């Protein structure tokens, strides 16, 4: 009976972890670039239940062994195995703002922060006071050569992540002038967005503000080469990949599973009370 308490309690604790993940997903359903959390669980080792007082004990060269027939299995509880992030593609939303960028495919934008380089799927950017392309928190967006300094209505980003500016208004005369891009009569290639991926991106650690940092399990950031990079779409942002209907159904499942484990503990407690207060007293 005591084992039943621990089994029910472990189930309640597991549902608490799951409820926290679902609640966090619902709270961030409207956050651009948010990726939902998923709680995965594993069961404790199961015990084989054998029939007692059965003539089945035999001996062999290494000693005795229990040959009583197995009549079933008994679970011993469950625990949280991992809480990981699902990086499924979110829906693209048009904003018509030149400062907004969406990635269509696997990969991450790089951002410079006081704690080092961080990574994000939230492409809702703005023009900073010093002319750099920044996140809403003021962290510069990185190109392959450093932070991107642009001007309003004077830069375009193609699907390959190359940042073009109007050559007539370029401050740096050393910029590459090209006529391949037909956005303006003459364009200057400012830089290319620094896009990275990871060997195991599901193990990236969330830092807040839609930023991620690498972990020992995810592996280091790898700069994506041409041909493997996601398509960059200017004037769009990627919405969260949270489905509110699915999360609400999961929340109902969590509440019912929590109540079921709670009833198990109550039943075990009542049975133990009967054993102690009635059976033991009669003997």
Image (cartoon, helix red, strand yellow):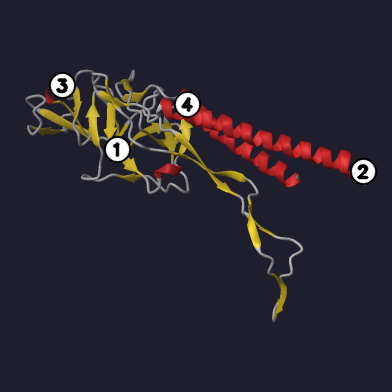
Q: Which residue is mark 4?
A: 248
Q: Nearer the viewer, mark 2 or mark 4?
A: 2
Q: Which residue is mark 1?
A: 194
User: The residue tagged with tag 2: helix, strand or loop?
Assistant: helix
Tag of residue 169? 3
Label 1–label 4 contact, CB within 8 A: no
Query: 248 and 116: which one is in front?
Result: 248
Query: 70 and 6: which one is in front?
Result: 70
196 to 53, vertically: above or below: above
Q: Nearer the viewer, mark 2 or mark 3?
A: 2
Indicate the quadrant where residue 111 lies.
top left
Determine whether, in the image, residue 33 is placed left or right of residue 75. Answer: left
Label 2–label 4 contact, CB within 8 A: no
For the residues marked 4 and 3, what is the alpha-carbon distance in whole angstroms?
52 Å
Q: Earlier in the sequence, mark 4 or mark 3?
A: 3
Estimate the x, y position of residue 54 in percent, counting from the top left: 74, 65
Which residue is rendered at x = 93% and y = 47% of the image?
283
Q: Earlier in the sequence, mark 1 or mark 4?
A: 1
Q: Earlier in the sequence, mark 1 or mark 2?
A: 1
For the residues marked 1 and 3, what is the alpha-carbon distance in whole angstroms?
24 Å
Tag of residue 282? 2
Determine whether, in the image, residue 116 is placed left or right of residue 2. Answer: left
Dot 1: few (<14), some (14–19), or many (≥20) neighbours within 10 Å? many
For the residues marked 2 and 4, what is the alpha-carbon distance in whole angstroms?
51 Å
Q: Earlier in the sequence, mark 2 or mark 3?
A: 3
Q: Nearer the viewer, mark 4 or mark 3?
A: 4
Which residue is rendered at x = 78% and y = 40% of the image?
271
Q: Nearer the viewer, mark 1 or mark 4?
A: 4
Label 2–label 3 contact, CB within 8 A: no
Q: Earlier in the sequence, mark 2 or mark 4?
A: 4
230 to 127, vertically: above or below: below
Dot 4: few (<14), some (14–19), or many (≥20) neighbours within 10 Å? some
């Amino acid at each position: 009976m005591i084992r039943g308490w621990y089994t029910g309690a472990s189930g309640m604790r597991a549902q608490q972890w799951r409820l926290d993940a679902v609640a966090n997903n619902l709270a961030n359903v409207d956050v651009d670039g948010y990726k939902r959390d998923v709680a995965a669980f594993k069961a404790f080792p199961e015990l084989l239940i054998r029939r007692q007082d059965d003539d089945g004990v035999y001996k062999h060269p290494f000693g005795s062994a229990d040959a009583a027939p197995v009549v079933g299995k008994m679970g011993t509880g469950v625990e949280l195995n991992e809480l990981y992030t699902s990086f499924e593609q979110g829906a693209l939303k048009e904003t018509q703002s030149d400062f907004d960028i969406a990635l269509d495919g696997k990969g991450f934008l790089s951002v410079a922060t006081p704690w080092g380089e961080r990574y994000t799927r939230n492409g809702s950017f703005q023009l900073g006071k010093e002319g750099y392309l920044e996140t809403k928190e003021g962290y510069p967006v990185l190109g392959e050569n450093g932070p991107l300094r642009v001007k309003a209505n004077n830069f375009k980003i193609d699907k390959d992540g190359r940042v073009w500016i109007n050559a007539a208004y370029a401050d740096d005369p050393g910029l590459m002038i090209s006529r391949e891009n037909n956005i303006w009569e003459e364009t200057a290639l400012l830089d290319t967005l620094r896009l990275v991926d990871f060997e195991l991106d599901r193990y990236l650690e969330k830092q807040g503000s839609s930023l991620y940092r690498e972990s020992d399990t995810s592996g280091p950031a790898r700069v994506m080469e041409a041909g493997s990079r996601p398509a960059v779409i200017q004037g769009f942002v990627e919405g969260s990949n949270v489905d509110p209907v699915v999360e609400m159904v999961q929340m109902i499942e969590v509440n019912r599973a929590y109540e079921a484990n709670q009833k198990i503990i109550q039943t075990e407690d009542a049975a133990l009370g009967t054993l102690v207060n009635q059976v033991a007293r009669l003997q």
